[in-house]
Amino acid sequence: MTIEGELLQALLAFEAAVTAISKDPKPDLMAHFNHIDKLSSQLPKNTDKELLHYLHKKSYEKARMFLEGRSDQIQKGGCLR
């Protein structure tokens, strides 16, 4: 699996953990953040700058949509990029 594929899986797992936050035991979100950061640091130097921006700003839903090929559906945020 490519690093982008692993990153997409990690983002999906993070979203699932967020939806389970009200359950006991509570999911360890820091483990998810750390895993996503680790994978992000392994992306090739020629990675699309939009994806890097989303990951840097922790816009994980946008990063997931980008990796799913749904860039045209991403709502632009307040940073005016």
Image (spheres, rainbow, N blue to C red):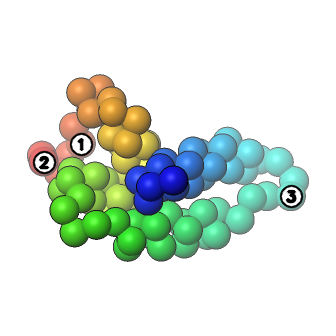
Label ID, residue 81:
2
Within-10-Å neighbours for mark 1: few <14, some 14–19, many 20+: few
The residue labelled by disc 1 is 77
Apparent side of residue 77 relative to residue 12 in the rendered image (left or right): left
Residue 15 in picture, x, y percent from top left: 59, 45
Viewer-closest of 47 and 58: 47
Query: How many numbered callouts?
Result: 3
Of the residues under marks 1 and 3, which one precedes in the sequence? 3
Residue sitting at 74 percent across and 45 percent down?
20
Distance from disc 2 to disc 1, alpha carbons, whole Å, reads 8 Å
Q: Residue at x 12, y 48 (%)?
A: 81
Badge 3: how crowded within 10 Å, few (<14), some, or many (20+)?
Answer: few
Residue 28 falls left or right of residue 70: right
From this view, report whether residue 75 is shown above or below residue 32. Answer: above
- Secondary structure beneath dot 2 equals loop
Q: Is residue 38 visible?
A: yes
Q: Residue at x 20, y 46 (%)?
A: 78
Q: Residue furthest left?
A: 80
**Mark 2 or mark 1, which is nearer to you?**
2
Of the residues under marks 2 and 3, which one precedes in the sequence? 3
Q: Are marks 1 and 3 in contact (CB under 8 Å)?
A: no
Foreground residue among 46 and 66: 46
Quick one: 58 or 6, which is closer to the camera? Answer: 6
Crowd tier of the residue under label 2, counting other residues whose Cα lies within 10 Å: few below 14, some 14–19, many 20 or above: few
Q: Are marks 2 and 1 in contact (CB under 8 Å)?
A: yes
Query: What's under tag 1, amino acid-wise?
Result: Gly
Determine which residue is flagged by label 3.
25
SS at badge 1: loop
